[in-house]
Amino acid sequence: LITDPPDGKIPALTAEAKTRIAAEQAFRKEHAYEDPEMINLGERCVNFGLPRLLAGYNSYSQIVQAPGYVTIMAEMAHDARVIPVGSRAHLDKSVRSWNGDSIARWEGDTLVVDTTNFSKKSDFRGSHENLHLIERYTRVAHDILNYEFTVDDPTTWTKPWTAMIPLKLKDELIYEYACHEANEAMQGMLKGHRFQEKEAAAKKSNQQ
């Protein structure tokens, strides 16, 4: 999918990112299932992040245009991004969200969506609040829309990189995406961890 750099490889992580990501992974491993907040956003059906790279599993998108706005709805979790098109500036940096603050403009026949203001809880391949995402939607045929995105985060990668995915028009409906039923799996994972904690405490008590 990588179109830039020309070698088709994602640029190296910065030294800072390697240290940060290793620490995050170690923390998650040590504190896994201590509470619901330690379970990642996707497993909790809260948010699946940007850019969307899903293929073959609830990967449809529906794009609707209206005066001054474009809405891009992802089938996964029914996430709808309502994006102003025109001259609006980004929100103040103090305003953060999982999917950031998106504004759009037209460059010829290409819709360019510029997104900043991601939350510290956002996570795209180790990039969090410093992610700058540029998405480009270009119709290259009646039934093909090229989706190209560039990600830039100097605290994560040594240089920006770009990928492109051709999206094919489908005459099909998007149905409700039911991510979970009463979070039963999460309850099981949390109960399982409580059991492990009791076992560990009992073992420690017997050794003393």
Image (tube, grey):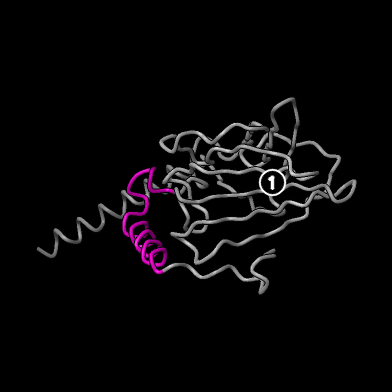
Mark 1 is surrounded, within 10 Å at the Cα level, by few (under 14), some (14 to 19) or many (20 or more) other residues, namely some
Horizontal side, residue 189 vs residue 116: left or right: left
Residue 163, how many percent across, how many down?
67, 60
Residue 58, how many percent across, how many down?
69, 46
Horizontal side, residue 6 vs residue 140: left or right: left
In the picture, the quarter occupied by the N terminus is bottom right
Circle 1 — which element?
Answer: loop
Residue at 43% x, 45% y is 121
Residue 10, how many percent across, how many down?
58, 67
Q: Nearer the viewer, residue 30 or 7?
A: 7
In the picture, the quarter occupied by the C terminus is bottom left
Residue range in magenta is: 15-39
Splitting the image into 4 quarters, where does residue 152 fall?
bottom right
- Is residue 36 highlighted in magenta? yes
Residue tagged by mark 1? 58
Q: Nearer the viewer, residue 113 or 188?
A: 113
